[in-house]
Image (tube, rainbow, N blue to C red):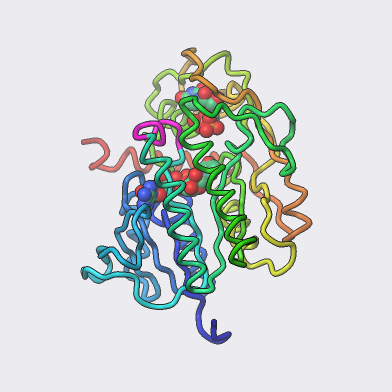
């Protein structure tokens, strides 16, 4: 049981990734003790380097497909080999490659991470009496035939396609979360995250925002897949992690699932033009084949998040892109990156 005066001890899996590193930062600023767990498969030490001296942060190298309470993990902050020691009050389960290029590189490991990672963290939550939030995804809806997407929509996923390791892995994780809730009374939160962008996106993760910005900064053609008329709705990372935190701490409203994203919808061509304009680049567009099962449209209905925990996005695409461009520009200009 948590002592109300003690800081919440919070475990973040995937904490050295793009979203995870921003979440760790927010949690530290909220006074939590943070245990950041990552296998660094797509995350990077540089994402959390500025937090390493923080007295309330512990960084542990661990693959969530193994039970963290049994396997010896490597504690980077203290340079010790240590299994998970103290009690945990909250678990944010973010560990999973998120970009299609990353999650399709080793699809079996992607499914293992989604399913075994969820099972291991849910078992830990049950043992600890901790509340646990799952970073689920708009990919649950597949190529949606209902637009915008509400949480009540069951989706349209190809179960055997190249994206299924991620889509079905995340769907299975949602199912496990709700079964742990019903069967074992674990307090769960399932957040369906829509396309999120911002500083610390991996410059080579193949996602549209990072690809376009890197290409524009290098004056290379922007690679538009298909006719570029497919849509996405882009949420800035600060809004996203604030939403995840509010959902976790909301006492009323229950488990979800709840969409978190920015409902402003853009075609991929719109995004390309905006990135060229904001970078002042001389880049042109080049068209390449559409990857298989690429969703044609995506926009969240976020009314439930607003009703349940008073959240709505604040940062528009222009402002968010300006911050992301500044970050990637600095990263690409750094000597290590040029090498
Ligand atoms: P990311 O790739 O930057 O972060 C994922 C992190 O998980 C990385 O640090 C990686 O090293 C770590 N990881 C992967 N497999 C692991 C394993 N087996 N054990 C331990 N750590 C492991 O991606 P992100 O954009 O920060 O996404 C974070 C979470 O949010 C993911 O679960 C993703 O599915 C979800 N999500 C993100 C978006 C988005 O647009 N960014 C959209 C929907 C859902
Ligand atoms: N996309 C594109 N060019 C790129 C990368 C992506 O046109 O260089 C398209 C992709 O086909 C998809 C959209 O942009 O329609 C968003 O892709 P991303 O990989 O960022 O995310 P997801 O498909 O998972 O929403």
Which residue is located at x 21 percent, y 70 percent? Answer: 80
Q: Nearer the viewer, residue 34 or 154?
A: 154
Within the image, what quadrant is residue 274 found in?
top right
Q: Is residue 34 left or right of residue 77?
A: right
Query: For the point 46% across and 26% down, which residue is it?
Result: 162
At x 50% / y 64%, what residue is drawn? 91
Tell me the quarter of the image containing the C terminus: top left
* Figure check: 27 above or below 39: below
Q: Is residue 327 visible?
A: no
| Quarter of the image where one finds residue 283 | top left
- Asked if residue 151 shows in the view, the reply is yes
Q: Which residues are magenta?
A: 99-106
Q: Is residue 327 left or right of residue 192?
A: left
Residue 105 image point, x, y percent: 35, 32
Asked if residue 104 lies in the magenta stretch, the reply is yes
Q: Is residue 45 magenta?
A: no
Q: Which residue corresponds to the image point at 25% horizontal and 35% vertical from the top-left?
A: 338
Give how far across and how far down residue 140 sits, in percent. 60, 38
The number of numbered badges drawn on the structure is 0
Above/below status of 181 relative to 46? below
Measuring from the top left, give residue 225's x and y in whole percent: 51, 18
Image position of 188 with respect to 276: above or below: below
Is 259 located above or below residue 289 in the figure?
below
Depth check: give the residue in front, 186 or 43: 186
Q: Where residue 37 sits in the image (x, y, percent)?
A: 37, 60
Front in this rendered view, residue 107 or 330: 107
């Amino acid at each position: 049981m948590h002592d109300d005066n003690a800081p919440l001890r919070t475990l973040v899996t995937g904490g050295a990734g793009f979203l995870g590193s921003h979440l760790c930062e927010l949690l530290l600023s909220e006074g939590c003790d943070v245990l950041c767990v990552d296998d660094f498969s797509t995350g990077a030490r540089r994402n959390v380097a500025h937090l390493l001296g923080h007295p309330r942060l512990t960084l542990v190298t661990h693959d969530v497909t193994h039970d963290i309470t049994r396997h010896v993990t490597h504690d980077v902050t203290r340079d010790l080999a240590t299994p998970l020691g103290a009690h945990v009050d909250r678990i944010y389960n973010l560990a999973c490659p998120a970009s299609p290029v990353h999650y399709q590189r080793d699809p079996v490991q992607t499914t293992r991470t989604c399913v075994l990672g969820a099972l291991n963290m849910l078992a830990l939550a049950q043992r600890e009496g901790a509340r646990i939030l799952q970073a689920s995804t708009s990919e649950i809806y597949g190529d949606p035939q209902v637009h915008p997407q509400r949480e009540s929509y069951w989706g349209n996923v190809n179960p055997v396609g190249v994206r299924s390791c991620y889509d079905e892995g995340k769907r299975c994780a949602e199912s496990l979360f709700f079964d742990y809730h019903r069967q074992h009374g674990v307090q769960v939160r399932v957040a369906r995250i829509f396309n999120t962008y911002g500083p610390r996106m991996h410059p080579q993760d193949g996602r549209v925002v990072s690809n376009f910005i890197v290409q524009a900064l290098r004056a290379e053609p922007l690679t538009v897949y298909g006719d570029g008329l497919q849509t996405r709705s882009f949420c800035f990372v600060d809004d996203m992690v604030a939403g995840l935190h509010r959902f976790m701490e909301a006492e009323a409203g229950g488990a979800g699932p709840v969409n978190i994203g920015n409902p402003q919808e853009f075609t991929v061509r719109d995004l390309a033009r905006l990135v060229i304009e904001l970078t002042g680049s001389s880049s042109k567009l080049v068209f390449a084949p559409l990857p298989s099962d690429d969703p044609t449209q995506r926009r969240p209905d976020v009314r439930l998040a607003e009703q349940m925990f008073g959240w709505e996005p604040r940062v528009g695409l222009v402002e968010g892109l300006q911050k992301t461009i500044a970050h990637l520009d600095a990263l690409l200009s750094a000597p290590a990156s040029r090498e």
